[in-house]
Amino acid sequence: MKDRVALVTGGGRGIGREVALLLAASGARVMIVSRSEAELVSVGLNYVVADLGTTDGCAHAIEETEKRLGPIELLVINHGIGSAHERLIWEQDPAVWRETMRINLDAPFELARLTVGGMCQRGFGRLVFTSSTAGEKAERSGSAYTASKHGVIGLARAIAQDAGPFGVTSNAVLPGWVRTEMAERSARTEAERRGISVAQVWSERASLYPQKRVLEPREVAEVIAFLCGDAASGVNGEAITVALGGVW
């Protein structure tokens, strides 16, 4: 891991922040990216502000990373938009579908497209995509999120086939409920919609798992960091669930 160049998207908070800190502690040279400079500054690592929902934003993040740190060897695609604002399919706003795909699926494709070729030429690379347990199981009132997270797994596996012969691995991690800011927003939305407390929402989520708790961001980050390392050279094209043994 020492001196490997890593780009971590969604690196200002939650899982992305923890991954970035773990990689940096292992000796990697890490660039984090998100739209919020205030969050990025608080992490204390190299950062670039970019809107990854645009092709220009993706290109900017990659160009800045490679200009300042060197060719990207570890790519952690962790940013995303949740499903709290979604509705039943017949009530779904097509704009929500397009926005979700733009951020959750188009951006991962662009980031991979712009980096994997170089990894293959150099004979080494690690891509790790943060999907979700919704990448294998559908949620109600979540057609866009569910479809996008299914798509991320497919993208990771397709890249594994294309790039695997060149020493590049590509995997997806599927977290269950994690105590992140995005999940907190969805909890507040659900609590308001159902007329219950936010604490009750989190209690119900915790009840889905044998340990009767939800994940902490660090628990997911540890798995992602492992997949970025040399010890994970034999793991390719996998969708690894991190969900405390629960179905979600």
Image: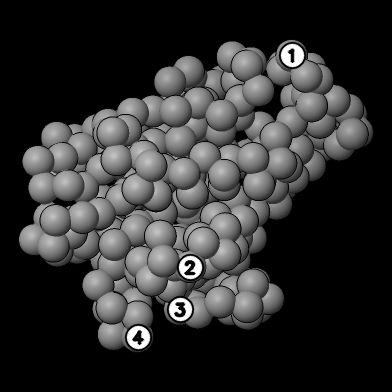
The vertical placement of 41 against 76, above or below, is below
In 3D space, how far apart are the residues under numbered discs 1 and 4 (Cα atoms)? Answer: 45 Å
The kind of residue tagged 1 is Pro
Of helix, strand and loop, which one carries label 4? helix
Q: Which residue is more in the foreground, 67 or 202? A: 67
Q: In this view, does 50 lie to the left or right of 216?
A: left
In the rendered image, residue 176, in percent from the top left (x then y), is placed at 60, 29
Give the mark, 1 or 3, whose residue is nearer the N terminus: 3
Q: In which quarter of the image is the N terminus?
A: bottom left
Give the mark, 2 or 1, whose residue is nearer the N terminus: 2
Residue 224 visible within the image:
yes
Q: Name the residue under label 2.
A: 27
In the rendered image, residue 40, in percent from the top left (x then y), is placed at 59, 74
Of helix, strand and loop, which one carries label 2? loop
Q: In which quarter of the image is the C terminus?
A: top right
Assess whether mark 3 and mark 2 are in contact (beta carbons under 8 angstroms): no
Q: Which residue is drawn at 29% across and 62% down?
A: 73
Of helix, strand and loop, which one carries label 1? loop
Q: Is residue 217 left or right of residue 88?
A: right
Q: Which residue is more in the foreground, 5 or 153? A: 5
Give the mark, 3 or 4, whose residue is nearer the N terminus: 3
In 3D space, how far apart are the residues under numbered discs 2 and 3 (Cα atoms)? Answer: 20 Å
Q: Name the residue under label 3.
A: 48
Q: Mark 4 points at which residue?
A: 68
Which circle, 2 or 1, is nearer the viewer?
Answer: 2
Of helix, strand and loop, which one carries label 3? strand
Q: In this view, does 159 lie to the left or right of 170?
A: left
Give the mark, 2 or 4, whose residue is nearer the N terminus: 2
How many other residues sit within 10 Å of disc 3, few (<14), some (14-19) or many (≥20)?
many
Give the mark, 2 or 3, whose residue is nearer the N terminus: 2
